Image (cartoon, coloured by chain):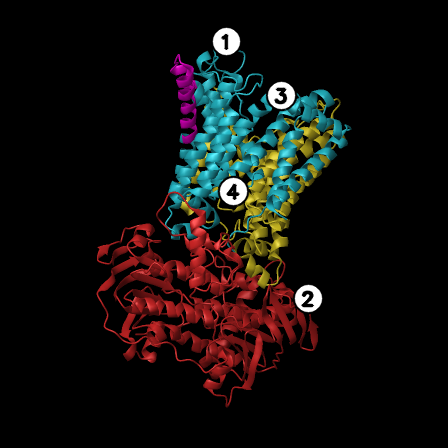
Amino acid sequence: MSLPSRIALAVALSLVCAALLIALSGHDPFSAFAAMAEGALGSPHQVGVALNKTTPYLLAGGGVALCFRAGVINIGAEGQIALGGCGTAATALAWPIEAPLPAILLALAGGALVGAAWAALAAAIHLGRQVHEVLVTLLLNFVALLLVQQALAGPLGEFGAGFLQSPRMPAAVWLPRAIPGLDAHPGFFVAVVVAAGLSFLLWRTRFGFAIRVAGASRPAAAYAGFSVARLTWGVMLLSGALAGLAGGIEVLGVQRRLIEGFSLGFGFKAVTVALLGALEPLAVVPAALFVGMLEAGALSMQRQVGVPSSLVAVIEGLTMLFVLAATVRRRAA
Amino acid sequence: MMDFLAAAIRIATPLLLAALGGILSERAGVFAVGLEGMMLAGAFAAAVAAWATDSFLGGILAALAGGALVGVMVAVVVVRFRADNMVTGIAANILVVGLTSYLLRAAGRGGRPPSIHLTPLPDWPIPLLADIPVLGPLLFDHPPLTYLAAVGCVAMAFFLARTQTGLTLRATGENPEAVFASGGNPKLVRMLAVVACGGIAGLGGAVLTLQQVGTFTDGMTGGRGYLALASLIVGRWTPWGAALACLVFGAADAFGLRLQAFGVPASSYVLQMAPYVIALLVLATLGRATRLPAAIGRPMD
Amino acid sequence: MRGIVRCFGAVRANDGIDLQVAAGRIVGLLGENGSGKSTLMKVLFGMVPPDEGTIIFNGRELSGHRPAEAMQAGLAMIHQHFMLIEAMSVVENVMLGWPAAGRWLKRARVGQQIREASARFGLDLDPDARVADLPLGRRQRIEILKAILRGADLLILDEPTSNLAPAEVAGLLAILRRLREEGRGIVFITHKLPEVLEVCDEVVVLRAGRVAGRAPVAGVSRAALAEMMVGRDTTTPHVPDARPPGAPRLVVRDLRGPGLDGIDFAVHGGEILGVAGVDGNGQLELADTLAGLRGATGTIALEGTDVSRASVAERMRAGLAYLPADRARTSLVRSMSIADNFFLRDTDAFLLHPAARAAHAAALMATYDVRAPGPQAVVARLSGGNAQKIVVARELDRAPGVVIAHQAAWGLDPGATRFVLDRIVDLRNRGAAVLYISSELEEVMAISDRVAVLFGGRFAGVVPRATADLGRIGLWMAGQA
């Protein structure tokens, strides 16, 4: 069975399980799914919301896919996204610019930089002290989230607000609406272009070839003349920057301020999406859309049919497990 | 001071149980990244079962079963389908967070979670021993699951070093082909190890709901599973080492709480970071010295 | 064993083989690489199921069995690549999977049994020693010990001397004779004729999956056996004609590091310097260090330039080619296509051009006779010989000045072996300097101009082939100069 059809089967299986769970709690699966679909696609506004939700998963997922391809299991997107949003907010507030385009670019650059720096920290510990990258990136996630909370409790916070949030971003940095009528910011389209770029990088450049060799066999990569350490730095910095960018776009495009916990779960969804897309950046686009639409429809499903929205997390987890079982890469035996 | 140490023990208990389970899994050759999900599943099962059956024993058994169930999922995907250990563990964790949240609400009325309020398990002071001055209350006046963790530590050390099954388990993590050539079944060993890991880690989750908090909230394990993983690595994959590491992390957490209680102007967020930062520091310091089981993470034919 | 058939895909590894072994006899199973000997024994031991055929052991039929049942029936296998847990001690390795050691391990009792058996058979094993600390010859004895303690009636030894120095080989053969006296049966798998003649009672020769001949050892001639093995008159190995060596192209001074204890040598243009020695004496370290994969102190000069600190890529550009011993994970990426593997080491263009690559790959495949559906075929599906041809094509096609070959013909069938050796000699004839490292002494002696012996991380001796004395070389290999 070909790879895409195996992934499709995995998705179908997890939807079947979800249907069973819905039935278990006494609701009708079909109306639940219908409500979900309506919530995601029912109107241009809804579609825009779905696209907005898809954007961070797509951006971060592309970077994660690249890392996994190189054999670097980077699970740090969660922290990198959060810190990226923090960095964007800080930049926008600290250096306000009148003109929108430079203001946006500067703020997003700030976010990408912070995300890349956090990934660099993980890479440094992993490469310098031989600690497994999964552990480093995971533990740093917790530290990152607490750092963001600390920033909001301190210099970045809005005085007098009931909960942890930053002041509103200056109007200059608000992301505009991409297409009139569609409530989506340009982030999604940027993310698609980035995905195409990543795919080109992976398949048509020597760097991408090196990534694929390193992921298949580390000794072969060394033998081929690639420095695995430099490759690791490269993919970590790139994916950190993309994750930071994702966080920044979320802050500038959706909430227009930095809110505590704004990106909870984004990082792990990026991993889900990367796996669903079989680590191929272009395939990550439909995978991210799938997850984005699930989420956009979840609240509607909860409101209309009464099925808890946490079902979406269940679908994502099940999908990941089924995809993992279905798409084993035979490493060099 | 005694209070502080007692707090450290209290915090360390769930970590230790999870770490003990993780040792089984990792010594057999499967990375135990799914500990977080196994703990959470155990915590959930314990809370719901204890609430529904009004018995702590039911809760404990349910915790075993819940954690083991997650173990079965991971075991099948990793051993039978030969998927990557790490990512499967992460996937299982994501699934469990969503599933427990969903089931909790599905169990209640109208999509709202039932209000579970359990009285936490009381301390069981050991007669005579608990009366020893100073050490008595510190070591011998704990709720039952804490004793279980300590006993489990001793039992596991014995099991690994002195039994045929323990030998086979250790050998599977070093060289599964050799186990096969010696007449064993390494795939079965790995699967059983992961399931057992799930059950024991589930007990760790039960400590949270039955012994400490008394209720279940979404994602309540909050990263303890990953701390347990760090502690078993720091402890060199031995029960005693893991116990020591868990105590250190517990002490770090307790220290932070003490500081806050004394009104020391240290931000609570920074203090909450302490266990993770310490784990990272210790791992970074040990660095190259960590000697993993030789065949860990490698799928078998 | 009767009528055993075992196929791996399109390859009939075993094609209707009959084999009989009686108690108190040593049967040699002789054949070239790829003749099916290992497969046959894996079938016997239960590691691989046969497609057809029956096995009767001690009067009972064995079928659908796994190693556990085989061992219970009284079979024991001593593998070529030892099935031992390096991090554990001897006694723990012996106790593994042995019910008689008890559920609660009886360490002391088993330790005592090990000492007794060790004394009786001259095995010289200390129960508490860590396997990782023991030399390869001793490790093999642990496997033999396991077989003895479990009361095996039939021992299968798979290429037992491939990791032993000549002196250790003598020790092993003595142990086998003692086992035979006790009435056990032994199957001795090898591709080395002299050993068969020395210790076996009868010999069965396999070729291309079938029995090519059987004979009692007494009275059979070496030439006859060789002919049965190879199927034609034993061709004289291609002896390259002597020619005066050119300028030194690879000069190594005082190379030291893990596994390397001070190596000095020079290889000249138009010369093959063969490096013989038992595997595990620094061959891998030497090869990897020269190629740039490992670091060491000392100097390495390539075409006059110091490359001691140069990267793998830089050494490649300076004209160094490397054929590593590990084909599964180092020299090839098995999950990638043939075309990708051909250009694995290309250090130029930033952008890849798939169409041009595919065309170039197809041309290379034709020149080097790589049998595969096309340049996009995945390397994992190719036979060992074809896979190695890809490595040879990639490394040798760009006419390198210096070649390092490590076990270049290991495990290849005779046709592929011939091909690889021919290419290497060809390059040497055109002026390249070749360092040919191999654990097969005959191979090294056949194509080298000079022969060096590696022992314990240094060269025990270097002699021109013409004046090489096998006895001395054997002593060097064993570390007794």
Q: Is residue A192 magenta?
A: no
Colour assigned to chain A in the rendering is cyan
User: Label 3, on which residue?
Assistant: A46
Residue under circle 4? B232
Compared to C169, does A230 lie above or below?
above
Q: Secondary structure at mark 1?
A: loop
Viewer-closest of C450 and A128 = C450
Q: Which mark is residue C320?
A: none
The x and y percentages for residue C31 are: 51, 76
Q: Nearer the viewer, mark 1 or mark 2?
A: 2
- Residue in the picture at 65% in, 43% down: B73
Q: Which residue is mark 1?
A: A160
Check disc 2 and give the amino acid type.
Gly
Q: Chain of mark 4?
A: B
Query: Which chain is tinted yellow?
Result: B
Give whichever of discs 3 and 1 has the lower sequence position: 3
Point out the frontmost of discs 3 and 4. 3
In terms of secondary structure, where does tag 3 sit?
helix
How packed is label 4: few (under 14 Cα within 10 Å), some, or many (20 or more)?
Answer: many
Chain painted red = C
Q: Residue furthest top?
A: A160
Circle 4 SS class: helix
Q: CA distance from mark 2 to mark 3?
A: 61 Å
Between tags 2 and 4, which lies in front? 2
Q: Is residue A110 magenta?
A: yes
Residue type at mark 3: give it: Gln
Classify 10 Å Cα crowding around label 2: few (below 14), some (14-19), many (20 and above).
few
User: Dot 3: within a 10 Å radius of its alpha carbon, few (fewer than 14), some, or many (20 or more) residues?
Assistant: many
